[in-house]
Image: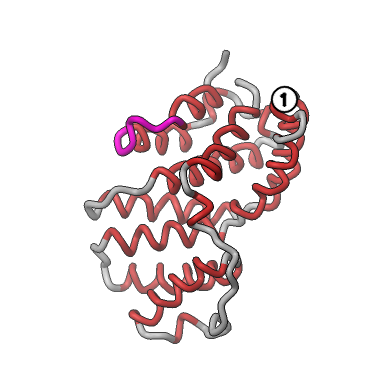
Amino acid sequence: MRSARFLILAMLAALLLSGCEQLFTTNLLSGLERDPSKLSFEGQVNYARQALRSGDASTQAKAYDALAASLASRNNTDPELNSLAATLALGASGLPGILGDLIDVATGDGFNDSASLAAALDAQLGNVNYDYVDAAVDQILATRNNGGTPTESQYVFALVGLVLKAGAEQNGIDNVDADEWDEVDALRALLILDHPESDFIQQFDDLTTDP
């Protein structure tokens, strides 16, 4: 498997170049102490949008749980709502919150020190809620199935989450064999279909392919 620094490059590029920072802001809003499961469907959608702007993972988790349950019960066919749910799930997973520590490593000597990058990644493996990573992937698939196109940012964050999930399952990113990237490869194939010009396609290919 190629060095974990390719993953760091993809994560930082996603954050800094593809507009992911606009998905997960940190402007805390009032009124989010409500239980979204007790709101009307329209209220849940509004709460979900506020939760995204809050940048708070636990609030986004509450919003996702309520909205996802309603989408399922209503047999939702609106891809925009699936896309909203996908972004909520990514925020709830904790992925945006770990980027700061990784940036600190990578902007030092990290890009030239694959051991430091691998260690930084491994230290974060337990800080991600992989149930929400899986939920985000499900909502990305639902977005497509309902005729929509997931954003490049959604794909990249979800792919990063799947890479970290594989590392967590194998007790370290560098312990993942080339034949253990099935979930990453499947989602990457959809990224290629929906965003064939994406700069991140090759980075994930490099990560999951033996040199």
* Image coords of residue 105 (percent x, y): 75, 37
Q: Is residue 131 left or right of residue 113?
A: left
Task: Please tell me whether residue 160 is drawn above or below residue 114 in the rendered image.
Answer: below
* Image coords of residue 139 (percent x, y): 38, 55
State the residue at coordinates (40%, 53%). 138
| Viewer-closest of 13 and 187 | 13
User: What secondary structure characterizes most of the magenta part?
Assistant: loop
Q: Is residue 43 left or right of residue 25?
A: left
* Image coords of residue 17 (percent x, y): 50, 40
Q: Amino acid at mark 1?
A: Ser
Q: Is 135 included in the stretch rendered in magenta?
A: no
Range drawn in magenta: 193-199
State the residue at coordinates (40%, 67%). 68
In the picture, which quadrant includes the C terminus? Answer: top right
Secondary structure beneath label 1 = helix
| Viewer-closest of 3 and 26 | 26
Q: What residue is pinned by disc 1?
A: 114
Displayed quadrant of residue 187: top left
